[in-house]
Image (spheres, helix red, strand yellow):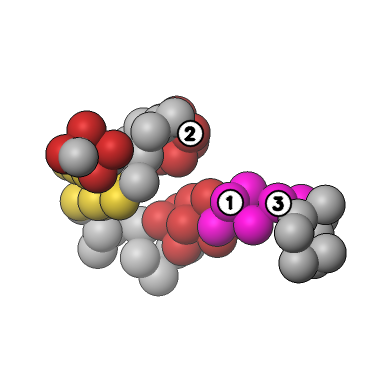
Amino acid sequence: MSVTGITFDPPVYEQRYCAAVQILEDSRWIHEIKKVTEFGCAEMRLFQLIRRIETIENILQVCSLYFI
């Protein structure tokens, strides 16, 4: 449980990953989206999911943790 007492099931980051993959695999966009940029990718979990989408040609990972 968080400090505010609010919890999400599944966790919000998992919901976000699922939504991103659904959009990237949607038939309306599958041949339109070629590049993906992820901000805040320290654990590279989203990368593990989207690297298997054959129509994605470029994936840019930006982690601000290393720019401190």
Which label sits in the foreground, 3 or 2? 3
Residue at mark 2: 45
Estimate the x, y position of residue 22 in percent, counting from the top left: 53, 57
Residue drawn at (40%, 70%), measured in percent from left and top? 28
Estimate the x, y position of residue 2 in percent, counting from the top left: 75, 55
Quarter assignment of residue 9 = bottom right
Q: Quadrant of the C terminus?
A: top left
Look at the numbered discs 3 and 1 and tell me whether their residues touch, using CB distance below 8 Å. yes
Question: Which element type, helix, strand or loop, lies under badge 1?
Answer: helix
Residue drawn at (35%, 46%), measured in percent from left and top? 40
* Stretch of the chain drawn in magenta: 10-16
Badge 3 local density, few (<14 within 10 Å), some, or many (20+)? Answer: few
Number of numbered discs visible in the structure rendering: 3
Look at the numbered discs 2 and 1 and tell me whether their residues touch, using CB distance below 8 Å. yes
Residue at mark 3: 11
Above or below residue 14? Residue 27 is below
Q: Which amino acid does label 2 sit on?
A: Arg
Examine the structure image and report whether residue 15 is included in the region drawn in magenta.
yes
Residue drawn at (41%, 56%), measured in percent from left and top? 24
Examine the structure image and report whether residue 11 is included in the region drawn in magenta.
yes
Please report whichever mark, 2 or 1, sits nearer to the chain's N-terminal start: 1
Question: Which element type, helix, strand or loop, lies under badge 2?
Answer: helix
Instruction: Using the rendered image of the protein, determine whether residue 22 is visible from the camera's viewpoint.
Output: no
Residue 12 vs residue 20, the one in the foreground:
12
